Amino acid sequence: MRTENLLMFADSERDANMLYAVEMFVPTPFIYLRLDGRCHVVLNDLDVARGRRLAPHCRVVPLARCLRQLRRLDGRPTGIAHVIHLLARARRIKKLWVPASFPYGLARELRTLKLRVKVKPGAFFPQREFKAPAEVKKISAALLMAEVGMAEGIHALRQCRIGSGRKLLYHNVPLTSEKLRSIIDVAIIQAGGLACHTIVAGGRQACDPHEPGYGPLRANQPIVLDIFPRSQKTGYFGDITRTVVRGRASEALRKLFAAVRAAQDLAFGQLRPKARGSQVHRSVQEFFEHQGYKTSRHNGRMQGFFHGTGHGLGLEIHEAPRLSATSPDVLKPGHVVTVEPGLYYPGVGAVRLEDVALVTTNGPRNLTKFEKTLEL
């Protein structure tokens, strides 16, 4: 089968496909070409030496050399499009496949140079969906950073005393979502990760799954802690969620917690090769229904279980495969997915629990080690 010739122009700090291809961080956009099966990267002088050291699987081409060659040829303009055209023309390549995120303006320039660019259908690197053992180790390391942050956050909650109005007092000062988030994020930085938009949502705020949380935290109310750091070294993500109560949880909330934990166990039991992501999700939905936890719209907002059961995890926080109602994905060995059922009822509270699983030929392996305890 003929190897497709690929082109990207992006930085590898933010573009997961570029980071996957070159395995090094470059903060400014650069050219990646896979020509006749071989990787080529065009880097500026600042990154050439580092590229040769960190990306030995790629042929590193200095951008300055390409620009000099263009000027010698016929005094042509020396933009990025002309550099790409120069390298493709040297191998008599007239067509390149690009990702859907490829810059439109650059694509137009290449077409004026008679170089065809077409968006590659489906995943740009389909193999990204399947995690090699080395990648599983990188995800596990990022997950450990998330657990370090979780441990620090829960330790701070345990250290709190309960003041008037059930406000939690940390070092005699009201503990807010913002303060607890900073405690968690600093611990993650010290462990080698970067945290962004860590969720610390208490009480009614926890009933909005993407609410980051703000203001004072209170005793006897659920606090959802959702932590998803990125490793500063590798770019891989970890992801963990726990729901805790400082003080005493209501009986209704304890039942909610038990149902979510049972639903998570149920989902884990189905993470086997050939299982459909939509069926795993449907089994969790049906379990909650049978337990009496209905999903509906009430007073203009959703309540119950109204998000997916899980998602792939790797160089992006959300990637294939998906465990959701509309997912077309079928699980295979090497998939790494989160399992995060949740229930949300403003009159009772919210509970979400999230672990990370590796799908193997022998079933799932839970990569998450952190305990699940409701009351602190």
Image (spheres, rainbow, N blue to C red):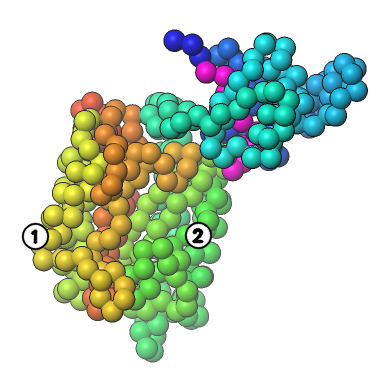
Q: Point out residue 151 in the picture as x, y percentages from the top left corner.
A: 40, 57
Label annotation for residue 140: none
Q: Which numbered disc covers residue 197?
A: 2
Q: Is residue 305 magenta?
A: no
Task: Answer whether residue 340 is visible to the viewer in this image.
Answer: no
Residue at 53% of width from left, 32% of height from top? 119
Residue under label 1, please give it. Answer: 290
Residue at image position (59%, 23%) is 96
What's the amino acid at mark 2? His
Residue in view at x 21 percent, y 30 percent:
274
Q: Residue furthest left?
A: 290
> Which of the 4 image quarters holds residue 89?
top right
The residue at the point 26 percent across, 55 percent down is 341
Kind of element beneath mark 1: helix
Residue in front for this viewpoint, 81 or 20: 81
Q: Position of residue 268 (x, y in %)?
A: 21, 43
Residue 12 part of the magenta-drawn span: yes
Can the viewer see residue 190 in this picture? yes
Q: Which residues are magenta?
A: 4-15
Instruction: Residue at the far bottom: name it.
Output: 164
Indicate left or right for 363 with 38 as reference. left
Q: Quadrant of residue 15?
A: top right
